[in-house]
Amino acid sequence: MNEKQFEVFLEIHKDIPREGPGDSDITKSTFKLCTDLPEKPEILDVGCGPGFQTFDLAEVSDGNITALDYHEQYIKVLEKNVSSADMQNRIKCVRGDMNKMEFPPESFDLMWSEGAVYIMGFDEGLKEWRKFLKPGGYLCVTELSWIKENPPAEVADYWNENYPGMMKVAEGNNIALKRGYEIVENIVLPDSAWFDNYYNYIEVKLPEMKAKYQSSDDLLKVIENEEIEIDMRRKYGEYYGYVFYVLRRIDQ
Ligand SMILES: C[S@@+](CC[C@H](N)C(=O)[O-])C[C@H]1O[C@@H](n2cnc3c(N)ncnc32)[C@H](O)[C@@H]1O
């Protein structure tokens, strides 16, 4: 994506509740799988976007949450919402790059990342982030994964081109074991998690955006890519999903 195309991407993604598939109930029930956390856990939400799941975590825990995202557009929304909810004492908003986080080692009881570890790569993220967890701390990430064998060629080709690193759940678990975690649980997000707070909001914007950028094939491509992604989900959603990998740091 060139710079202008990325601006159009950000325009499509402006002022929508989430920046990726997710579900409040699943966020909260997944948190409850993280047993033995201290009363006020230190939590890091990596790639928090506008912070939908950040507020879910604040509701379900008594923890202190550091919410980190690279893009100003999202951090500004989060800051405004944190301030309106008078939650500055619970949620700290940080503009930063997940590739270059400089927290002291073993700072967090729980690291959370919905739909964002792919930016570093699942393997790399698990490897690099482990040091920020206290021993026995949890890492909960959602990652796009194949959930059914033999996907039809159309969807296999689509994801091979757009996300060549996409793994089966068992492959994700093997990486986690290799990187020093135990597997607590895998949870596949329901189809509603893709549409209710994400695709539905994007889809209604697309006709207007198409009209606005009709003179540029380059920019129209960004909009059409969103349409194709949503279409793939409608047609082939049974073959892939966002999967919560609930992991716990183990030290031998
Ligand atoms: C798919 S969105 C998920 C956002 C949010 N967790 C949610 O579920 O709504 C990925 C997020 O990662 C952020 N991001 C992209 N590159 C990043 C980086 N290098 N460091 C930190 N955040 C990054 C994006 O701005 C975006 O908010």
Image (cartoon, grey):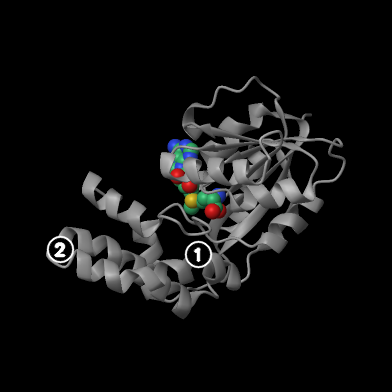
Where residue 41 appears, as percent x and y from the top left, is 78, 35
- Left or right, 178 with reference to 60: left
Q: Residues within 10 Å of mark 2 (few under 14, many from 20)?
A: few
Q: Residues within 10 Å of mark 1 (few under 14, many from 20)?
A: many
Give the secondary structure at mark 1: helix
Rendered image: mark on residue 198: 1
Q: Is residue 134 above or below residue 207?
A: above
Residue that label 2 marks? 217
Q: Is mark 1 within 8 Å of ligand 1?
A: yes
Q: Is residue 2 above or below residue 136?
A: below
Give the secondary structure at mark 2: helix
Question: Which quadrant is home to the C terminus?
Answer: top right
Rendered image: mark on residue 179: none
Q: Is residue 28 above or below residue 197?
A: above
Q: Nearer the viewer, residue 37 or 216?
A: 216
Q: Looking at numbered disc 2 in the image, what kind of residue is underneath it?
A: Asp
Residue at the location (28% across, 55% down)?
8
Where residue 208 appears, as percent x and y from the top left, is 28, 70
- Left or right, 218 with reference to 197: left
Where residue 166 appears, as percent x and y from the top left, is 48, 56
Q: Is mark 2 within 8 Å of ligand 1?
A: no
User: Does residue 119 appear anywhere in the picture?
Assistant: no
Of marks 1 and 2, which one's residue comes earlier in the chain?
1
User: Does residue 124 appear anywhere in the picture?
Assistant: yes
User: Please, which residue is most extreme toward the left here?
Assistant: 215
Q: Quadrant of residue 88?
A: top right
Residue at the location (49% across, 41% down)?
75
Where residue 16 appears, as percent x and y from the top left, is 47, 59
Q: Is residue 242 above or below residue 45?
A: below
Q: Looking at numbered disc 1 in the image, what kind of residue is underneath it?
A: Tyr
Q: CA distance from mark 1 to mark 2?
A: 25 Å
Residue at the location (55% across, 75% down)?
238
